[in-house]
Image (cartoon, rainbow, N blue to C red):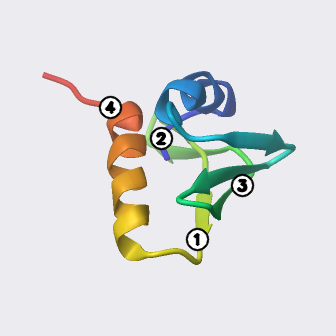
């Protein structure tokens, strides 16, 4: 994701509104329909294109619940982390 770690964590409470969650170091555990969803945060990195430096944060989602529940969660989560221009 195209965010620094502080930017990601600042948006997290709003993105997880309505979901119970806990944070431990680089792992975030969220209760999605009584099934844990774990988000693992990688080390913050920088992508360089000529003189432009773009921060990004690798993340991984692990969820063993239904696809419908995950898609519902992801739709809400994605709305808070979208970046747009124009």
Where, quadrant-wise, is the C terminus in this rendering?
A: top left
Judging depth in this view, the residue of 71 and 57 nearest the camera is: 71
**2 or 1: tag closer to the N-terminus:** 2
**Numbered disc in front, either 1 or 3:** 1
Mark 1: secondary structure: strand
The location of residue 14, given as percent across then percent down, is 50, 25
Mark 2: secondary structure: loop
Q: Is residue 15 left or right of residue 39?
A: left
**4 or 3: tag closer to the N-terminus:** 3
Total labels: the figure holds: 4
Q: Residues within 10 Å of mark 2 (few under 14, many from 20)?
A: some
**3 or 2: tag closer to the N-terminus:** 2
Which residue: 61% across, 63% down? Answer: 60
Q: Which residue is mark 3?
A: 42
Q: Residues within 10 Å of mark 3 (few under 14, many from 20)?
A: some
Q: Which residue is mark 4?
A: 83
**1 or 4: tag closer to the N-terminus:** 1
Q: Residues within 10 Å of mark 1 (few under 14, many from 20)?
A: some
Which residue: 20% across, 25% down? Answer: 85
Q: Which mark is residue 2?
A: 2
In 3D space, how far apart are the residues under numbered discs 4 and 2 (Cα atoms)?
9 Å
**4 or 2: tag closer to the N-terminus:** 2
> Are the residues tagged 2 and 1 within 8 Å (C-beta)?
no
Q: Residues within 10 Å of mark 4 (few under 14, many from 20)?
A: few
């Amino acid at each position: 994701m195209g965010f620094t770690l502080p930017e990601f964590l600042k948006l997290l409470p709003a993105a997880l509104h309505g979901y119970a969650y806990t944070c431990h170091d680089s792992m975030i555990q969220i209760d999605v329909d009584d099934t844990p969803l774990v988000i693992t945060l990688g080390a913050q990195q920088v992508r360089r294109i000529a003189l432009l430096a773009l921060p990004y944060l690798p993340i991984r989602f692990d969820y063993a619940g239904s696809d419908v529940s995950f898609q519902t969660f992801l739709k809400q989560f994605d709305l808070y982390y979208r970046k747009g221009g124009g």
